[in-house]
Amino acid sequence: MARQGRTPTQHRPGVYLLHFDAKLHHAGHYLGSAANLHVRLAQHEAGNGARLTQVIRELGIGYRVSAVWFTPTVREARELERRLKRQKNGRKLCGWCRHVA
């Protein structure tokens, strides 16, 4: 149990990168941000996340969390997500792709 006044790590805001086990057309990753990473990842798992992850799930393509960047605030998480998306470097950010390359 978490100590009072402390937020468990997975309940903090941040940015996350999902690595798909197989590409869907050009997409091999999904980059998103959330106020509560635990809740958002559970939404993806249940098929209630982003449309891309819903389709991946419907097609039976697996995925895993490849990277997480925690931020102090939700606003900073959204800003970091935008910066990372502008780089269009999912493979370079992905721990699984870097490991295989």
Image: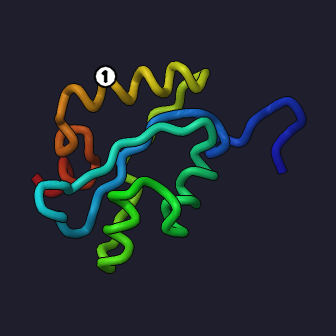
Of the pair 68 and 55, the residue shown nearer to us = 55
Q: Which quadrant of the structure image shows residue 60? A: bottom left
Figure check: 70 above or below 32: above
Of the pair 50 and 32, the residue shown nearer to us = 50
Left-right relation of 33 to 67: right
* Residue 34 x/y as whole percent: 54, 39
Left-right relation of 71 to 86: right
Residue sitting at x 42%, y 53%: 50
* Residue 54 x/y as whole percent: 40, 65
**Mark 1 residue crowding within 10 angstroms, few (<14) / some (14–19) / many (20+):** few
Seen from this angle, which residue lies furthest bottom? 60
Left-right relation of 84 to 15: left
Residue sitting at x 54%, y 69%: 46
Residue sitting at x 59%, y 33%: 13
Q: How is the image coloured?
A: rainbow
- The amino acid on which the numbered mark 1 sits, given as a three-letter code, is Arg
* Residue 92 x/y as whole percent: 18, 39
* Residue 48 x/y as whole percent: 52, 62
Q: Which quadrant of the structure image shows residue 16? A: top left
Of the pair 58 and 6, the residue shown nearer to us = 58
Q: Secondary structure at mark 1?
A: helix
Figure check: 26 above or below 88: below
The residue that mark 1 highlights is 83
Q: Which quadrant of the structure image shows residue 6? A: top right
Residue sitting at x 17%, y 64%: 23
Give the mark count: 1
